[in-house]
Amino acid sequence: MKRLIAKSPFYTRIIGALFIALFGVALYVAATPPVRADDTSVAAGEHIIALHDDGAVKGFITKKATLKEALADANIAIDANDRTEPALDTKLVANSYQVNIYRARPVVIKDGLTATKVITSYRTGAQIAKHAGLVLHDEDKTELSQSTNPLGDGASEIMMVTRATPFTFDFYGKTSTSYSLGKTVGDMLNRKHITLAQNDVVVPGVDTPLAAGLHVRLYREGTQTITQEEEVSFETEQIKDANRDKGYKETKTLGKNGKKNVTYEIIIRNGKEESRKEVNSTVTVESVKQVEIIGTKVNLPAGSHEDWMAAAGIPPSDYGYANYIVERESRWRYDARNGRTYGLCQANPGGKMSGAGSDWETNPITQLKWCSGYAAGRYGSWRAAYNHWLAHHNW
C-alpha cells in the first residue's frame, strides 16, 4: 500500500493541495488580531461593549443609542434594583465602553435587636446603610458576612452593625456628644489618638468603663490658651419711610451672623476655671447687616379738633377747657414727646394711654378719651383741670 500511494500521481496532488490549504489558513489566523473591548476598528455607528456582570465578562457590538437599549438588544436583563456604571441612560458616542453591572441581592441588616432586609446592589457597609436609610456615625462598625442560615434569614448575606457608645466629651472646654467603640475611657482616648500631656487631667479616670451618657472631661491644669469659634451678631439698620404707613415693616436685606475665632488665656485650678481673658479675636466670616424699611406715615382722623373731641365723648361745654390744655401741652400734636411724656395731653409715661386703646400712639381720638378720663379722675372735671393748669401751668 505504501508503495502504491507513493507512486500514484493522483494521491500526490491531493496531499499537496491539502498542505497548501492548511498553510493558507494558518497564515490567515496568524494575521487576524483578536477582537478586544478597547478595539476602535468598528464601523460607523457601532460601539464595542465590554461587560463585567458580577464577575462574568463578555463583549458585544451594538448600534443602539443608549446603554439601556444596547443591553436590552443583547438580551441582558436589568432589574429595577440593579445598578450599572455608567448609568443606563448614558448615550453611546464613543467607540468602546467598559460597563459594570452590580446585581441586587437581599441583605439582612442586624442592628442590635432590629433586623431589616433590603434589596441592594451596593457592596460596602456604608453604602448599604445609606440605601436602607440607616444613619451611621463615623465610629460605628459594619461587617458583611455570608449567612449561616439563608432560609431562616431570608438572605444569603448578613450585615452586622456594631454601634459606638455615645457620651458627652468636654474636650479642653469644648463640649459635644461623641462616640467610640472603646471599652474604657483610656481605650476611647487611644482610638481617638489623644495623648495626654504632663498637666492634662481626665475625669473620670482612664480605667472607667465607657457607658452611654457618661460625661468625660479632659482639661489642663494651670495657665493655658484656648481658641473657640463664636458667632458675630449682625447689625440692623432701619430706614424710615414717610410714604409708608406707621406699622409697615419690610426687610430689604436679611441679616446673617458672622463667625470669629477668639483666643482666651485661662487659668484652671483643681479643675475649675479661675479667670478668662480675651487675647485675640479674628473674624473669619463677616456678618451681613440687616436693612429694614419702617413706615412712619400716620393718617389722622378726618375733621377738626372739635370733631376729634366729639368723637372722644367730650361734652361741647368742655371743648374750650380741653382745647386750652391740649394746645399748651402739645400744640395738638399726637406724637409730641418730651422725655417720658407723650401725646396730646403729655401722659407720663405715654404707655398709660394703652388702656384707652391699642392705637394710643397714633390715634388722637384714643388719646383724648384717655385725657378725658384723666381730667375727671384726678380733678373731677375738665373745668377743674383747666383751673389747675392756670394756677400751676401743668396738670
Image: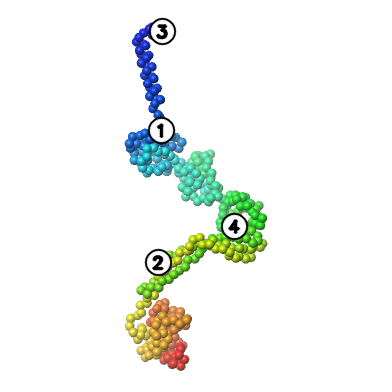
Q: Answer whether labels 2 and 1 touch (C-beta < 8 Å).
A: no
Q: Residues within 10 Å of mark 1 (few under 14, many from 20)?
A: some
Mark 1 or mark 3: name the one nearer the start of the chain: 3
Q: Which colour scheme is used?
A: rainbow
Front residue of this view, candidates 276 and 59: 276
Quadrant of res 2: top left
Q: Residue 171 carries which label?
A: 4
> How many residues crowd mark 2 within 10 Å: few (<14), some (14–19), many (20+)?
few
Residue 252's disc number: 2
* Amino acid residing under circle 4: Phe
Q: Place residue 387 in its image quadrant.
A: bottom left
Would you place residue 185 above or below residue 85 in this image? below
Q: Is mark 2 on a helix, strand or loop?
A: strand
N-terminal-most mark, 2 or 4: 4
Specify few, some or many for label 3: CA neighbours under 10 Å numbering under 14, 14-19, or 20 or more.
Answer: few
Q: How far apart are marks 2 and 1 (CA)?
A: 64 Å
Q: Real-space Cα distance between discs 1 and 3?
A: 48 Å
Residue 297: % across, % down? 37, 76
Q: Name the residue under label 1.
A: 36
Residue 100 appears in view: yes
